[in-house]
Amino acid sequence: MKIRLLALGLLALSMSVSAAMATPSCGMWNWQTDGSYFQVCVNDDGSQHCYKATDSNGANAYEVSCSS
């Protein structure tokens, strides 16, 4: 029983560590001429995700296309 609990604990720890490493790296929110804010995030695998928001804190953010 103790070994089973230890194994479950190690599994949970390894899953939480791998989830933490998957956090994307995001730049600052940049003001756009239409009054919105734009942010680019890059995942560990190099894939980009772009977001648009209503203020520099990321309020009402939603994902948009990264291409212009």
Image: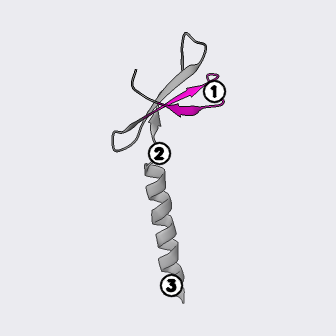
Q: How dense is the environment of label 3, judged by Cα within 10 Å: few (below 14), some, or many (20 and up)?
A: few
Q: Is residue 19 above or below residue 12?
A: above
- Which residue position holds label 3? 4
Is tag 2's residue or tag 1's residue first in the polypeptide sequence?
Answer: 2
Question: Residue 24, image x and y in percent?
Answer: 45, 41
Q: Which numbered marker is on residue 43?
A: none
- Which residue position holds label 1? 57
Q: Are marks 3 and 2 in contact (CB under 8 Å)?
A: no
Q: Is residue 32 above or below residue 25?
A: above
Q: Residue at x 59, y 18 (%)?
A: 36
- Which residue position holds label 2? 23
Q: Nearer the viewer, mark 1 or mark 3?
A: 1
In which quarter of the view is residue 55 placed? top right
Under circle 2, the secondary element is loop
Under circle 3, the secondary element is helix
Q: How dense is the environment of label 2, judged by Cα within 10 Å: few (below 14), some, or many (20 and up)?
A: few
Alpha carbon distance from label 1 to label 3: 44 Å
